[in-house]
Amino acid sequence: MEEGLSGFCIKGSHVRGNNGNNNGGSGTKCGRWNPTTEQVKVLTELFRSGLRTPSTDQIQKISTQLSFYGKIESKNVFYWFQNHKARERQKRRKVSIDENDFISRDNIFNNNNNKISSSKRFFEVKEYQSDQRVIETLQLFPLNSFDENEQEKLRFHANECRETSSFPYTINNPEMDHPPLDLRLSSL
Amino acid sequence: MEEGLSGFCIKGSHVRGNNGNNNGGSGTKCGRWNPTTEQVKVLTELFRSGLRTPSTDQIQKISTQLSFYGKIESKNVFYWFQNHKARERQKRRKVSIDENDFISRDNIFNNNNNKISSSKRFFEVKEYQSDQRVIETLQLFPLNSFDENEQEKLRFHANECRETSSFPYTINNPEMDHPPLDLRLSSL
DNA sequence: AACATATGAATGAACG
DNA sequence: CGTTCATTCATATGTT
């Protein structure tokens, strides 16, 4: 269709084949932040660990640590959590009327036997379990024993964690050459 | 991105033959929603009636009604309007800029560039308002394709319709055998 | 098959 | 925070 001109800064290569990182560190690609898979992985993990609304301080630290994987600013982290949280809710909240697909022949594939009942606002709740070892590291973290729903209720604990836990954990992805990131909530 | 993977369902058939256009009640299609022509027709009609950003409630109802024609979820309706609106706007903006290129240098109506003072935590919120120009352009260049342009200006009315208007509108396609759908905005 | 386009879906950014 | 906007990604469909 129409092309990207639309503005001020055209992306050099919009071939999201970024499995490495795209604008990391050097690209002055402008435009919006395009998180690397590593960054997303870490953020997701933090989220899963219970972090929902990081403080300014935490954001700063997270941002700093993630900057290793590529260009990133504090606001990106801020927005990421805002959006992630909002959408998490958007999906599951409004636990009402979406049971209206009576003609659903598609249920053949619906193995939604997951803990999530198929009733959110509009969206499906997708599983993101494919995050492997990085997660493993934090899996032992106390808060992680809850499901997202429950964590939601106990969300406020997340921000308190920093003062209690003394769980010495560090994420260190073996397939990459990078400095270890201490992502204990308590360290943020 | 834990949600970016939309490939949970590999399409066994890259055989273009999606046979026609809908998977209404037989296809065990996974992947993305493929609206039936009837669904599109109704959605388009609603759009032309002035609906731009249906509320959650409206979305639910529309979805329910459209489910008669085939598989559909609320989120599909949501996205449909989101996309349709965005693309209409995008197209118009492009045209406007194109028609008005030489003047479009950025300051024609810029009187109030500074309301940006709201610093959100770390970053400045930059104001980029370009609608003014577009609107103005439209006034100068009444490129009226059908009536979409007019609709846009009156968009805000549309969302009020649901509670005030007595827009007597009912779609009842004669060429089909189906229950009449009351698509008056006021009924949504 | 390669290329082009229409459009569903996702998400970063930002508004009220 | 809930919503909305802008841009991009992904895929179905159309064309050469």
Image (cartoon, coloured by chain):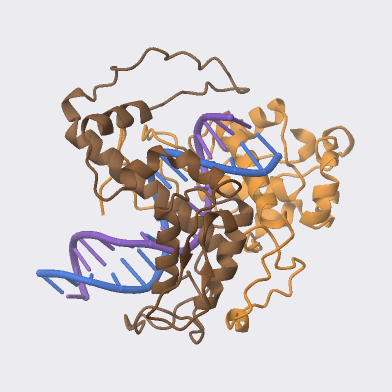
Chain colours: A orange, B brown, C purple, D blue
Relative vertical location of residue A39 with respect to residue A76 in this rendering, above or below: below
Task: Judge by depth and name the residue closer to the eye, B150 or A123.
Answer: B150
Left/right placement of residue B137 relative to residue B158 reads left
* Name of the residue lying farthest toward the right: A164
Task: Judge by depth and name the residue closer to the eye, A78 or A72.
Answer: A78
Residue A28, by quadrant, is: top left
Residue A180 makes an appearance in the image: no
Residue A167 placement (x, y as % from top left): 83, 43
Task: Judge by depth and name the residue closer to the eye, B129 or A13.
Answer: B129
Residue A121 placement (x, y as % from top left): 66, 57
The residue shown at (16%, 25%) is B102
The residue shown at (70%, 68%) is A118
* Quadrant for the N terminus of chain A in the image: bottom left
Residue A80 makes an appearance in the image: yes
* Quadrant for the C terminus of chain A in the image: top right
Residue A146 placement (x, y as % from top left): 83, 56
Task: Judge by depth and name the residue closer to the eye, B97 or A29.
Answer: B97
Relative vertical location of residue A178 with respect to residue D9 in this rendering, above or below: above
The residue shown at (39%, 83%) is B13
Image mark count = 0
Left/right placement of residue A140 relative to residue B73 reads right
Residue B44 placement (x, y as % from top left): 40, 60
Relative vertical location of residue A133 with respect to residue B31 in this rendering, above or below: above
The residue shown at (51%, 48%) is B53
Left/right placement of residue B69 relative to residue A22 reads right
